[in-house]
Image (tube, helix red, strand yellow):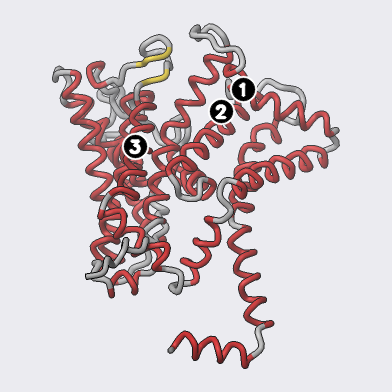
């Protein structure tokens, strides 16, 4: 009996599949080049914007240098373990903002690999954050290790179940996940507003007029490994986020679940023909995506915020999930790419505000919004390769002689 050989990958099986699958295959040829060029072009365009506000090219270079230093990236060239050094402190704060972005980026990337667009990272993040706060307050006195583990597990599972609602709706009634996850975002937001609002179940007990939650107990606080405990040091949640990157890669590339998720993402019809349950994988992909975003919320609550007030986190609720979309797009929905994208956006978020906050190099209004300009340009340009490939593919079809097209169709049928 002859050896049938190794089974084809989902990518290979999708070559004759959907347009999205063919575009994804062509995008893979760009490798790391397209994201790097995208970032460089975004910085170039932002430099032109700075120059257009009656500044010189040299001023634009000074601005980028101050963002670099404000993010603490100059610490790499002069490392020190003392947070008294401003570069060390800035780097620790940049990594604090990078941690949730890694996870919300993974939340978008995992769903995307199944052919779905998870816009609900904000709501899933908030569900994990609120559950962690609730258990972190009410279970005071529990063994610290068990307390932290319980808060993280419960918050992650709650967010997973919450995201799974969108997967169930898509699998059963065909509701588009973009619409359902946006709606779920606002359900989570207003539920949280009620929980911590005046008289709410989670609202701070010693000041009934202050719409903020109670602080989690000290036993539920994630330990800091860099800096002074409790004084905005860098907590161990960073290592949890890095472990999540490894889990993301292993799930997609080393498990049957990952194979099925990728197969559905590239061609759901072909996957169904091959015996893969498309509906089940829609639910599983959304649930796993929600787990990543919920984990981000639990780490922010136990590691940094300790209590919650709408809009008062380092990266506000209304932004963290949407920045995760940009992170995943820049990272091309891969594990290492998402990690690097999160570092870039974390550096931009902290470096622009703190590197340019007290600077007189450019107008303060422009300085405060420069990070959003750069982020927007990156998102705009990262989709340009998809558009170019689509236009190029359409041009070739238009130029192909009708007889040649018919002959190719007959050859494919035979």
Question: Tag 3, which secondary structure?
Answer: helix
Question: Residue at horizontal 50%, vertical 7%?
Answer: 82
Q: Position of residue 388 (x, y in %)?
A: 64, 64
Residue 244, picture quadrant: top left
- List the residue tagged with mark 1: 70
Sequence order check: which comes first, mark 2 or mark 3? Answer: 3
How far apart are the two marked residues, 2 and 3, measured between alpha carbons? Answer: 23 Å
Vertical comparison of 330 with 138: above or below: below
Q: Position of residue 38 (x, y in %)?
A: 64, 47
Question: Tag 1, which secondary structure?
Answer: helix
Q: Position of residue 169 (x, y in %)?
A: 28, 65
Pointers 1 and 2 in contact (C-beta within 8 Å):
yes
How far apart are the two marked residues, 3 and 1, measured between alpha carbons? Answer: 27 Å
Q: Is residue 25 left or right of residue 374?
A: left
Question: Residue at horizontal 43%, vertical 37%?
Answer: 102
State the residue lying farthest toward the left. 142
Vertical comparison of 286 with 206: above or below: below
- List the residue tagged with mark 3: 244
In this view, the mark in front (2 or 3): 3
State the residue lying farthest toward the front. 1
- List the residue tagged with mark 2: 350
Q: What is the quadrant of the N terminus in the image?
A: bottom left
Comparing 8 with 21, the one in front is 8
Q: Residues within 10 Å of mark 1 (few under 14, many from 20)?
A: many
Q: Residues within 10 Å of mark 3 (few under 14, many from 20)?
A: some
Question: Tag 2, which secondary structure?
Answer: helix
Vertical comparison of 392 with 357: above or below: below
Q: Which mark is residue 168?
A: none
Q: Is residue 319 visible?
A: no
Question: Residue at horizontal 61%, vertical 65%?
Answer: 389
């Amino acid at each position: 009996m002859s050896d049938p050989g190794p089974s084809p990958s989902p990518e290979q099986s999708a070559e004759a599949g959907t347009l999205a699958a063919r575009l994804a295959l062509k995008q893979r040829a760009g490798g790391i080049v397209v994201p790097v060029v995208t970032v460089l072009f975004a910085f170039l365009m932002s430099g032109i914007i700075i120059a257009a506000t009656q500044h010189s090219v040299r001023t634009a270079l000074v601005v980028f240098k101050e963002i670099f230093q404000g993010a603490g990236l100059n610490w790499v060239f002069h490392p020190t373990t003392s947070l008294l050094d401003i570069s060390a402190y800035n780097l620790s704060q940049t990594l604090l903002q990078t941690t949730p972005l890694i996870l919300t980026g993974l939340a978008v990337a995992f769903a995307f690999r199944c052919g779905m667009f998870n816009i609900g990272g904000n709501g899933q993040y908030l569900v994990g954050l609120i559950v962690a706060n609730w258990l972190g307050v009410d279970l005071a006195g529990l063994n610290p290790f068990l307390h932290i583990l319980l808060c993280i597990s419960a918050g992650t599972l709650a967010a997973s179940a919450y995201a799974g609602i969108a997967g169930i709706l898509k699998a059963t009634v065909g509701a588009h996940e973009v619409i359902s996850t946006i709606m779920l975002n606002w359900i989570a937001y207003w539920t949280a507003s009620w929980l911590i609002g005046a008289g709410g179940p989670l609202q701070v007990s010693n000041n009934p007029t202050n719409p903020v939650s109670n602080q989690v107990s000290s036993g539920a606080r994630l330990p800091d490994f860099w800096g002074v405990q409790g004084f905005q040091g860098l907590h161990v949640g960073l290592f949890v986020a890095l472990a999540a990157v490894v889990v993301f890669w292993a799930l997609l590339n080393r498990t049957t679940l990952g194979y099925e998720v990728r197969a559905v993402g590239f061609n759901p019809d072909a996957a169904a023909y091959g015996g893969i349950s498309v509906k089940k994988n829609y639910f599983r992909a959304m649930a796993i995506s929600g787990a990543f975003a919920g984990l981000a919320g639990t780490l922010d609550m136990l590691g940094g915020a300790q209590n919650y007030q709408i809009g008062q986190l380092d990266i506000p609720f209304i932004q963290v999930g949407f920045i995760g979309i940009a992170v995943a797009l820049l990272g091309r929905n891969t594990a290492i790419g998402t990690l690097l994208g999160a570092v870039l956006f974390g550096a931009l978020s902290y470096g622009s505000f703190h590197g340019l906050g007290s600077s007189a190099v450019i107008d303060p209004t422009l300085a405060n919004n420069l990070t959003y300009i750069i982020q927007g340009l990156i998102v705009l340009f990262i989709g340009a390769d998809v558009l170019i490939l689509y236009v190029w593919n359409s041009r070739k079809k238009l130029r192909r002689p009708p007889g040649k097209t018919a002959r190719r169709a007959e050859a494919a049928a035979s």
